[in-house]
Amino acid sequence: MNDHTDATDDSDSGGNRLRLPGRADVTSAIGRLAWRRRNARDQRVAGEASARNAVKLEPGAEPGPPLADATGTEDDDDHAATRFVPDPQAAAFFDVDNTLIQGASIILLARGLAKHKFFTAQDVAGMAWSQIKFRVSGNENADDVAAGRDKALSFVKGHTVAELTALSEEVVDTSMLDRVWPGTRSLVQMHLDAGQQVWLVTATPVMLARVIASRLGLSGALGTVAEEEDGVYTGRLVGDILHGPGKAHAISSLAEAEGFDLSKCYAYSDSFNDMPMLTMVGNPVAINPDGRLRKYASENGWDIKDFRTVRKAAKKAMPGVLAVGGLAGARAAVRSSYGVRTMGQIRRIF
């Protein structure tokens, strides 16, 4: 018998052949386990680095955009029933993409940087398509996350912190503030009015997250930290992109430093991938949730707030689209649902 063939056991009286793990199976399993351990370590490092780099902003340093000027709708009666009690041990943590603002902040940043020749239009289109896949499927793809990380590192390497901060301010002022969901902005203000700290927790670069927080008068931001030496980015991350468990590590470290009682805190997100952040606080809230988060939130009695309009109808059709035509069908459905034909138009939606 060839030593490399699958081992079997023919002793079953019914003739069933029991397949035992081969060398390739064991090697693959060990590889997956090693990747999980490495990813868990990188997320812990990313979270702790994000908390260390958290800079508390001056309260009310910058006024937020008028609600009437922001994109979206809100239910005034729903918000009228929401009130927060002043408590220095309570804080609110908000995801950014599609929770606070409509769309993906990293794509909005990339589009702005493309004007300064940091990116090509093709680069931006590729990132936009990765976001569309994520919005349709609700799953973070490891390859897409890695590609996004490598692209982010390629554009910051060799540039100064001051340069990228100035460009981030330009992008926020020209492309992001008018995309803030009014309903989410209202919730943010209610926490601030109650004297509670409000922090952004996002996978986007912390330099960009800080600018958003400053413009909205928030307490600060936890985001992905890029390594720097003497005010210049090295092209490496501290840990990894801040997402999933990394966000939970960041919040835990910040809570310890600030004296927050997590059982009194609030967390807001649109994505099931933020479950580590949502389940660590006493008051999780799903905003514009994806399908899996909506289902879980509904089954567990969480608050659900949806500030989207026409996009809801298209998303309801997506599971069927994926079953029939995969992502190619999803792209066609997005184009059909919104009457769009080009990637540029799709980017404006997402």
Image (tube, rainbow, N blue to C red):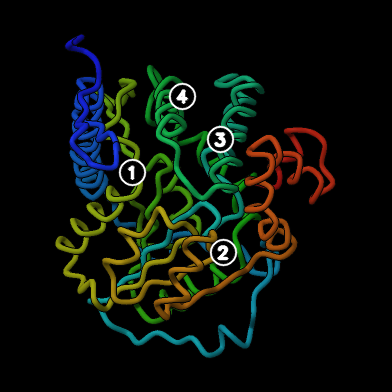
The amino acid marked with disc number 2 is: Asn
Q: Nearer the viewer, residue 219 or 298?
A: 298
- Residue beneath label 4, please? 151
- Residue beneath label 2, please? 288
Image quadrant assignment for residue 154: top left
Spot the residue most to the front. Answer: 13
The amino acid marked with disc number 4 is: Lys
**How dense is the environment of label 2, judged by Cα within 10 Å: few (below 14), some, or many (20 and up)?**
many
> Considering only order in the chain, which callout, 4 or 1, is on the residue closer to the N terminus?
4
Q: For marks 3 and 1, give the one nearer the viewer.
A: 3
> Considering only order in the chain, which callout, 3 or 4, is on the residue closer to the N terminus?
3
Q: Taking 55 as reference, is 171 above or below it?
A: above
Q: Taking 187 as reference, is 321 above or below it?
A: above
Label 1 element class: loop
Q: For marks 4 and 2, give the one nearer the viewer.
A: 2
Cα separation, mark 4 vs mark 2, equals 28 Å
Tell me, yes or no, whether the two marked residues, 4 and 2, touch with CB atoms within 8 Å. no
- Residue beneath label 3, please? 130
Label 4 element class: helix
Cα separation, mark 2 vs mark 1, equals 21 Å
The amino acid marked with disc number 1 is: Leu
